[in-house]
Every structure is written in structure tokens, then in C-alpha cells.
């Protein structure tokens, strides 16, 4: 049985159909492939070494000259050439020119100092004058005729005689219940107007103000008994009459200077 197996093997090995025919240049192809793989590995190792040196801050110019021409050739063929593929960027030079110009300073303006900013001249502002006083109380005005005064609906009728002779007439008003609040002359018109108790003059004087306050507000005030009188300017000419109890004001009136009614 063993002999038959040996005979069969010999017959198979001696069969020409099972021979592997190798082309004449197969050996050279195998050698060239091996050489290429060897050079590729060498180029990759060299490139890796160069990248490592560059990353460590060592320039290629500081590398010692290599005596291995094969490694140099591989490096030259493996690394891309930047000098031939793209031109170097142009160099840019920046020149800064500084010029100094001296300008004569402007002359100092008036009222200014050499070390500070110009000072504005101080102007004295006169105190604001007090509001002008008027010769009226509400719709009623000194010198107004009786007929015109009645038209204002400010008088309370009927009137009463203002003097023993009955020459002038007196009225109360809608704001002052005193029957002698308004006195009217047939020839001069209204010669007296009484202010309501809650009213004040343009300078803030009214019922309850002290004598000192009246004199401070109206320095030209003159005293006659218990009255303080202040003559005012304007047309018609008239006078403030501040009736007091000796210490404070009790009544404030406006009186026409040209009054012809007795006792007014």
C-alpha cells in the first residue's frame, strides 16, 4: 500500500502539466519591488526625523551635512519643493515720517491768565424788581364809574351812603362783605377798594402781616396813627392804606389820591 502511494506521488511530480512556468524577468521584478519598498521606508523615516527636528525648533540649516547620498536623494524626492512651486512673498517695508511743526501760540485774550483758561468777566445782575402793583381788585379798578362797576357783577346792591352828606355811595362786594368795601364818587368814580382778607399785595403783605414786615416790603411807608400809607406810582395816582391794630395788619385798602369823598 505504501509502495502504491509512493508510485502515485512520483507520477504526479513528474507530470509536466503541474510545472510552474516563471517568466524570465520575474526575478528582476521581485528585486525591484523589494528595492522600492526599502527606499520608501527609508524616505518615510528620514521625513519623520526632519519633521521632529523642525518641531523642536532646530532649523534644517543647522543639520550636519549628510554623507548618505541615498537618504539625501530620497529626501529631495519626498519633500515638496516650495521654491519652485510658488514664489516667495514680496517683502514690505514701512517707512514712517514724522515732522514737527512749531506754531506760535495765540495771544492771551483779555481777562485771562497764562496758566488757566480764559475767565469770563463777572457781570453784576441787578435784583429782579418786585411785580408791578395794579390799581384794581378783581374786575374793579380805581377811577371806574359806578355804571361800569355795576356791569362787572362784583358789587352787592343796594348801595349805602358813604358820608353824612350822601355825596358818595358805598357797596359791599362778592368777596368782601363790608358795606364800605367799595366807595364811589359821582365825579371820580371808584375812590376806595378793599382787598379780601385772604388776598396779599404783590410784595406779600396782607391781613396778619406785622408792621415791621410792611416797612420792610415798602420802605417808603409812612405811619399816620394806626395806618401805614404807601403812595404808589401809575395812572391814576393811588395809595396803599394798611390799617393795623398797632402790631399787625387788619385791613388792606387801595385809595384814589384824587378822592373827593369826605373821610376816605
Image: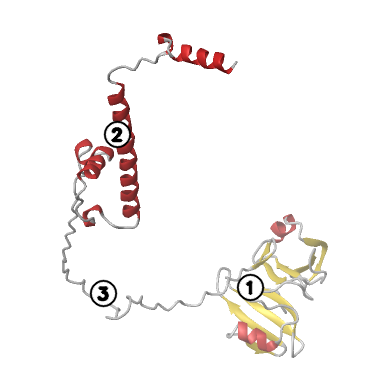
Name which residue lies at 28% across and 39% down.
78
Q: What is the secondary structure assignment of the residue under circle 2?
A: helix
* Towards the viewer: 104 or 69: 69
Q: Is residue 59 left or right of residue 97?
A: right
- What number is the disc on residue 202? 1
Q: Which x, y percent locates residue 65? A: 19, 53
Q: Which mark is in front, 2 or 3?
A: 2
Foreground disc of the pair 2, 1: 2
The residue beneath circle 2 is 35
Residue 106: which quarter of the image? bottom left
Q: Are marks 2 and 1 in contact (CB under 8 Å)?
A: no
First in sequence, mark 1 or 3: give its number.
3
Q: CB under 8 Å between callouts 2 and 3?
A: no
Please count the marks in the image.
3
- Residue 58: x %, y % from top left: 29, 57
Mark 3 nearby-residue class (10 Å; few <14, some 14–19, many ≥20): few
Give the quadrant of the N terminus: top right
On the picture, is 102 further left or further right than 34? left
Left or right: 38 in relation to 85: right
- Between the C-alphas of marks 1 and 3, the distance is 45 Å
Front residue of 235 and 27: 27
Residue drawn where x is 47% and y is 15% of the image: 10
Residue nearest the observer in this picture, 13 or 64: 13
Measured as percent of width and height from the top left, residue 61 is found at 21, 54
Q: Which residue is mark 3?
A: 109
Amino acid at each position: 500500500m505504501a509502495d502504491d502511494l509512493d508510485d502515485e506521488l512520483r507520477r504526479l511530480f513528474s507530470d509536466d502539466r503541474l510545472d510552474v512556468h516563471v517568466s524570465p524577468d520575474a526575478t528582476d521584478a521581485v528585486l525591484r519591488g523589494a528595492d522600492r519598498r526599502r527606499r520608501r521606508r527609508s524616505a518615510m523615516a528620514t521625513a519623520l526625523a526632519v519633521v521632529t527636528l523642525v518641531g523642536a525648533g532646530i532649523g534644517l540649516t543647522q543639520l550636519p551635512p549628510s554623507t548618505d547620498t541615498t537618504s539625501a536623494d530620497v529626501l529631495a524626492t519626498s519633500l515638496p519643493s516650495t521654491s519652485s512651486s510658488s514664489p516667495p512673498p514680496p517683502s514690505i517695508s514701512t517707512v514712517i515720517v514724522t515732522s514737527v511743526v512749531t506754531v506760535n501760540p495765540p495771544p492771551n485774550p483779555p481777562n485771562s491768565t497764562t496758566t488757566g483758561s480764559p475767565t469770563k468777566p463777572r457781570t453784576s445782575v441787578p435784583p429782579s424788581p418786585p411785580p408791578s402793583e395794579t390799581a384794581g381788585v378783581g374786575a374793579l379798578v380805581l377811577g371806574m364809574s359806578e355804571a361800569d362797576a355795576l356791569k362787572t357783577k362784583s358789587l352787592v346792591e343796594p348801595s349805602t351812603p358813604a358820608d353824612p352828606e350822601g355825596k358818595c355811595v358805598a357797596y359791599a362786594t362778592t368777596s368782601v362783605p363790608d358795606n364800605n368795601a367799595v366807595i364811589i364818587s359821582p365825579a371820580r368814580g371808584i375812590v376806595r377798594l378793599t382787598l379780601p382778607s385772604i388776598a396779599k399785595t404783590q410784595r406779600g403783605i396782607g391781613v396778619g402781616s406785622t408792621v415791621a414786615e410792611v416797612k420792610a416790603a415798602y420802605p417808603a411807608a409812612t405811619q399816620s396813627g394806626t395806618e401805614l400809607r404807601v403812595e404808589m406810582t401809575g395812572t391814576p395816582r393811588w395809595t396803599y392804606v394798611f390799617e393795623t391794630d398797632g402790631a399787625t395788619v387788619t385791613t388792606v385798602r387801595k385809595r384814589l389820591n384824587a378822592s373827593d369823598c369826605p373821610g376816605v
